Amino acid sequence: MQGQLLHGAKVGCRFRPVNGPTPVATQLIAKAPRGAGAFVWQRVVHVRKMPSTPLSAQGAAGMANVEIVKVDQGGANARILAREAKVDFRRVEAASLKIATRFSSAEGKRMFVRMFNTLQLNMHFISVIARTRLDHEDIGRIETALRGRIDAATASLNEAIDGAEALFKAHGITSLASYDTVPLDVDVRVLSSISRRFLEVLVKLDQLMPLLQTLEIHEVVSAQAVDTQRAGLKRQVRDIANGARSFATGLRRRMNALDARAVSPDDAEGPDDAHGAAIGEAVDSTTRAPDGPADPPPSAGRDVEPLPAPTAVAAVAE
């Protein structure tokens, strides 16, 4: 009976908003039946609509925080630097030019860390220390031979870079492969002109590596051809550093022989001119084809091929 009397009646209900203390005006809410023979009271709740950012911005912000793969955070550079022995420059009193340099490729980083500072010490010994004791003409011939190797490596790298850029244009390639590892940023201390030119060779090698990788990814050049070209260019760069080390070793032995003759002059068996002529012949042999296999350098095991000229210099110094 009460249900029939109240059927169709209007009831007022006061509500407060969810997001604020301000009360909402009284609103009449109709009673509606739900179910069989039963009536329930319905309430209308007013919810204030919250402002929202566009969906595209939300998606961009969300994707920026999503890591699909884990990338290097500097661990690769730490491993490269940890495996190499530190070069002692405490006895080098020469002034140096500081050049900010960046290496991105794995080949460029390793070649720089393994060879640049060693070459600098050897060149300091050849150009500064040995020149005070030995004939200047012999030292000049050794420096000329090393500059010739640097020029040959530079020409090969320039040719490879030009060829890669031509293939980029011919096949419509506009994007370059990049490295996900952290680049190696260093302030290089350059002691001599040969060191500066060798640093330029290393930078060119680092510049070429992503070009070859891009061509391999696009299947413009086969992986075997890329590996062959990369190995040949790296060998030329290593020959420069290995040659400087071998020349320095030969000069050091010659200086030790001079000291020994100064202590016991009766044991001297030949004039210094013979040593100088022998070194000149060995230096000239760097521009000729090797007549036979040479002994492997001490750095064998790092994909280094033997060099005939430095070995000849070491043999002459003996």
Image (tube, rainbow, N blue to C red):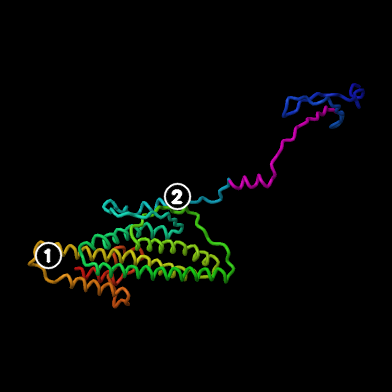
Q: Nearer the viewer, residue 69 or 80?
A: 80
Question: With respect to residue 30, does 200 lie above or below?
Answer: below
Q: Is residue 42 magenta?
A: yes
Question: With respect to residue 139, does 118 lie above or below?
Answer: above
Label 1 or label 2, whichever lies nearer to me, is: 1
The image shows residue 9 at horizontal and vertical percentages of: 90, 25
Q: Is residue 36 left or right of residue 73?
A: right
Question: With respect to residue 264, does 270 lie above or below?
Answer: below
> According to the image, label 2 marks what residue?
74
Q: Which residue is drawn at 70% across and 44% down?
A: 54
Q: Which residue is drawn at 25% across and 71% down?
A: 312
Q: Is mark 2 on a helix, strand or loop?
A: loop
Circle 1 packing at 10 Å, graded few (<14), some (14-19), many (20+), is some
Three-letter amino acid code of the residue under disc 2:
Gly
Quadrant assignment, res 241: bottom left
Q: Is residue 162 left or right of residue 123?
A: right
The image shows residue 106 at horizontal and vertical percentages of: 43, 58
Q: Which residue is drawn at 46% across and 54% down?
A: 183
Quadrant assignment, res 61: top right
> According to the image, label 1 marks what residue?
261
| Any part of residue 142 in sight | yes
Q: Nearer the viewer, residue 45 or 76?
A: 76
Three-letter amino acid code of the residue under disc 1:
Arg
Q: What stretch is highlighted in magenta?
A: 38-64
